Amino acid sequence: MVQRQSPGQRRYETSVVIVGTGFSGLGMAIKLKQAGIDDFIVLEKSDDLGGTWRDNTYPGCACDVPSLMYSFSFEQNPNWSRLFAEQGEINDYLSRCADKYQVRDHVHHGVEFTGAEYDERSKTWLVTTGDGTEYVGRALVSGVGALHIPSYPDLPGVQDFEGEIFHSAQWNHDYDLKGKRVAVVGTGASAIQFVPKVAEQAEKLHLFQRTPPWIQPKPDRAIPESVKKLFRTVPLTQRAARAAVYWILEARYFAVFNKRLGKAAEWLSKRYISKTISDPKLREAVTPDYSMGCKRILLSSDYYPALNRPNVDVDTSGVAEVRKNSVVTGDGQEHEVDAIIYGTGFHVTDAYDHLAIVGREGRKLQDTWREGSETYLGITVSGFPNLFFLLGPNTGLGHNSVVFMIESQLNYVIDCIRRIHRGEIGQVDVRQPVQDAFNRELQDELGGEVWSVGGCRSWYLDENGVNRTLWPGFTWKYWMRTRKVDYSDYEVAAR
């Protein structure tokens, strides 16, 4: 591995700089290794690997995509304990991948990425970090993901609260919830997992819901040892099982993008509510009034039963004010609480607003994306040569595994980086007309769906109400578009 450090300076020169050690960053590092490229550095702000699966340790944290698909196709795990793996098991899987493919030595820990500037003359990126260390690379790969900056609601008076406050992504495991009066703000993907666990411990749980999610039962169960043994001895059986899971998940596309089938899925979810919740008022409160697919469809078999508990109240009037030891709701009632837990998600569409990324001719990414984040294939941005995003805008999913999308992007990016590394080309910069045409097509496909219907409020949408998050179709179509780089889409310059 070649990592040149300038004498007397905190500055490293390398071929590729990767940011992040979640599925995206580690996947990119592994692909570089497999391509015979050893000259790269991975920047990680934490002292350990894992990305979102390292950070989110709240009770009940687990994946809502089956384990067989929430893993790299080239590194299958025959020993998953459950159909839907929990946080610790996924984090351990990523750690094993890093060890097996020998990428740990490439990781610089405690280094927070703050920005980068492209030098047109040398065709390199100068990467800046929080501690002042600089990195120079011919290619820059962003694997930071979107679910890493917690989003906090603006609650009046919260600064005066004398109890405990924390976000689900920064869980305080030292705080004992037993016998406490707890307020939970938010009912998203994280909340429906930790609320049942908190309800078992708390004396009283006040759940403040703004918009109820569509929830379907989670078909989770332990994987029998006999099945794991079969996967170990005949790997082809696991690949066949993975393929079956892929197509089952792909069929969920219709619940998100087909209005008629979406209505059928809504009926099934409402039936699930009727079966699990007996109180008519509570049943009405947790029944969404928007089309399925507007927000992420969630899976849980213990969330609704937890709401039935006598120590749990669901409040839909909102938080009007927070006082020293209480929360005042929109209907004027005051509830004494010892702790406030935010289950309010993350900054998604504005995840890059805090980074100073400057491309050709001083072009700033924040200015380029001022009216909304746009890329080509979710990977490249015109005016920012040799910069590659993994899980960039409009490559998120509401029906299948994002790891499939990541792998599609890795194969696309490695094609470009391999040519840059060999010196065959100096830079690749997607043509603006190509990027514009792609985004017109993308938004045309999204425009007729549930996000264009009035009343849809979702983290999928930016401040202008435009969906900058989801890929508008089947994942196999994305794979088809990214399996080979069409260099006519790019301005290609010699080294």
Image: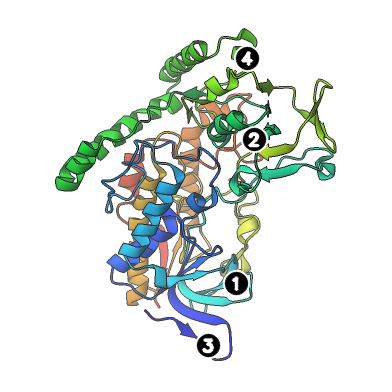
- Kind of residue at badge 4: Leu
**Label at residue 282:** 4
Residue at the left extreme?
234
Q: CA distance from mark 1 to mark 3?
A: 15 Å
- Kind of residue at badge 1: Thr
Q: CA distance from mark 2 to mark 1?
A: 44 Å
- Quadrant in the rendering for residue 395: top left
- Residue at screen point 34% across, 28% down: 251
- Disc 1 versus disc 4: nearer the observer: 4
Q: Which residue is mark 2?
A: 178
- Residue at screen point 19% across, 47% down: 232
Q: Which residue is mark 3?
A: 6
Q: Which residue is mark 1?
A: 128
Q: Mark 3 falls on what kind of element?
A: loop
- Kind of residue at badge 3: Ser
Q: CA distance from mark 3 to mark 4?
A: 64 Å
Left or right relative to 423: residue 316: right
